Image (tube, rainbow, N blue to C red):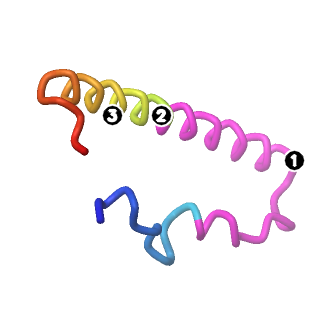
Amino acid sequence: MQDEDLPRPRGDAAEKLASEDLAPLSQDELATRIDLLRAEIARVETHRDMAAAHRKAADALFGKPA
């Protein structure tokens, strides 16, 4: 089993964010939070795309494993 096949560890940042109570936040705080989350999503997508390109290059060089 490869690492990417493993489930996320319990208590990771995404799980903590999803369980956080948003009721006490103002509209401005919520807008700021949305901006930060969008920036983080873009960062993760960029990393994912770079990892996929790296994997594709490795597969082309060494052949795709069976």
Q: Main secondary structure of the magenta part?
A: helix
Residue located beneath label 2 in the image: 43
Residue located beneath label 3 in the image: 51
Q: Is residue 20 above or below residue 60?
A: below
Question: What's the CA distance linking mark 1 and mark 3?
Answer: 36 Å
- Where, by quadrant of the figure, is residue 55 drawn? top left
Question: What's the CA distance linking mark 3 and mark 2?
Answer: 12 Å
**Sequence-first disc among 1 and 3:** 1
Dot 3 crowding, Cα within 10 Å, few <14, some 14–19, many 20+: few
The magenta region covers 15-44
Q: Residue 35: horizontal and vertical position, in percent?
A: 68, 36
Residue at image position (54%, 31%) is 42
Q: Secondary structure at mark 1?
A: helix
Is label 3 or label 2 in front?
3
Between 22 and 4, the one lying in front of the other is 4
Indicate left or right for 53 with 16 as reference.
Answer: left
Indicate left or right for 61 with 22 as reference.
Answer: left
Question: What's the CA distance linking mark 1 and mark 2?
Answer: 24 Å
